[in-house]
Image: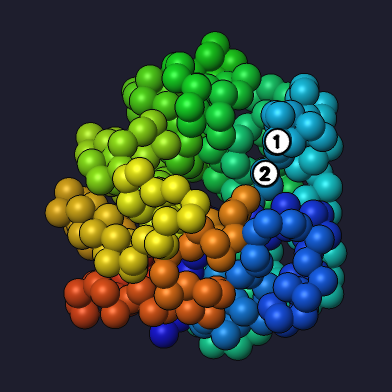
Amino acid sequence: MRLIDGHLDLAMNGLDGRDLTAPLDDLRAADPVAGQTATVSFPELRAAGTRLCLGTLFAMPRTPESPGGYVDAAGARHQALAQLDQYRRWEDGGHLRLLRRAEEVRAHLAQDTGPLGVVLLMEGADPIRDETELPFWVEAGVRIIGPAWGATRYAGGTGAPGPLTGAGKALVEAMRDLGLTLDASHLDDAAFWDAAEIGGRMIATHANARALVPGNRHLSDEMARAVAQTGGVVGLVLLSPFLQAGWRLGDPRAPLETVAAHAAHYAGLIGWDRVALGTDLDGGFGQEKCPAGIERYADVPRLLSHLPAHARAGVAWANWARWLETCL
């Protein structure tokens, strides 16, 4: 079965020194990232049947764990531009194809072979100095923007409650006017509802259900319904602490049934046609925190057997395909 993944941090991993063009076992043997067993490479994605993903431009802020992160918009922009260049280099090498329009997605998905299709998603909007820069990023291929990660200059985010700032409201309004889509993943509740009031398309590329795992990193039922009301799709994250409340490293990894439970919860709220994948694999964590049974990306299709038969194709790829072919 084909897959479309709503969230992969490919360029971040490439710039961390991981050779994603290599077979996964070779990557693991020479992995420069300590403490996170890699699960993703281009050959792995092909082995899983992945034809397309939303690939991030993710700028890491300075934190105690990331002392080399950005401290201002210029630093964030530098990181995002370096990742954009990485995607272009991979495209030049024939490893992927950047997709900018719905008709390009249709043409790409009409073929079963060829490189991975990638639609660019900016995760955390700090690389954008202000809303007047949006046309630059649109020209570069960005079609989806998540204003927050933690707190940004634009919005409250994960573990950092707060509304859209004045700059955030201007950004979201400009995104709406340009036809860009807002990724609600990581938005704090106050910022989410500010954005919903402004209007425009919303998706959540990688966000599990707060009803099952508490915290502002996850979508409340009301937030999930609001995303669906704009025609949006919600992607499921394959990260044990996001699947099982109270999970800690060293615990048995969350079973695949927990992924199915989040999927079924969302389906009960918004329908199976709005539930998809947003695995976030190798997004700052490795195999150690994946669900049990996901030892590498090629194992991702295993989770489909835990879903109702009628829903599997939609969750695997068709729901994202419909959205991309309609809204990109």
At 69% from the left and 22% from the top, the residue drawn is 130
Q: Amino acid at mark 1?
A: Glu
Residue 257 rendering spot, x and y as whole percentages: 27, 67
At 45% from the left and 40% from the top, the residue drawn is 185
Q: Is residue 30 visible?
A: yes
| Image-quadrant location for residue 312 | bottom left
The N terminus lies in quadrant: bottom left
Q: CA distance from mark 2 to mark 1?
A: 16 Å
Judged from the image, the secondary structure of the residue bearing numbered disc 2 is strand
At 41% from the left and 62% from the top, the residue drawn is 253
Left or right: residue 77 versus residue 295 is right
Residue 301 rendering spot, x and y as whole percentages: 42, 78
Tell which circle, 2 or 1, labels the residue nearer the N-terminal end: 2
Label 2 Cα neighbours within 10 Å, binned few <14 / some 14-19 / many ≥20: many
Identify the residue position indicated by label 1 in the image.
Answer: 65
Name above or below for residue 69 compared with residue 280: above
Judged from the image, the secondary structure of the residue bearing numbered disc 1 is loop
Nearest the camera: 136 or 282?
282
Foreground mark, 2 or 1?
Answer: 1
Left or right: residue 278 versus residue 36 is left
Q: What label sits on residue 14 in the rendered view?
A: none
Left or right: residue 114 versus residue 310 is right
Residue 118 rendering spot, x and y as whole percentages: 62, 64
| Image-quadrant location for residue 135 | top right
Identify the residue position indicated by label 2 in the image.
Answer: 58
Name above or below for residue 48 compared with residue 317: below
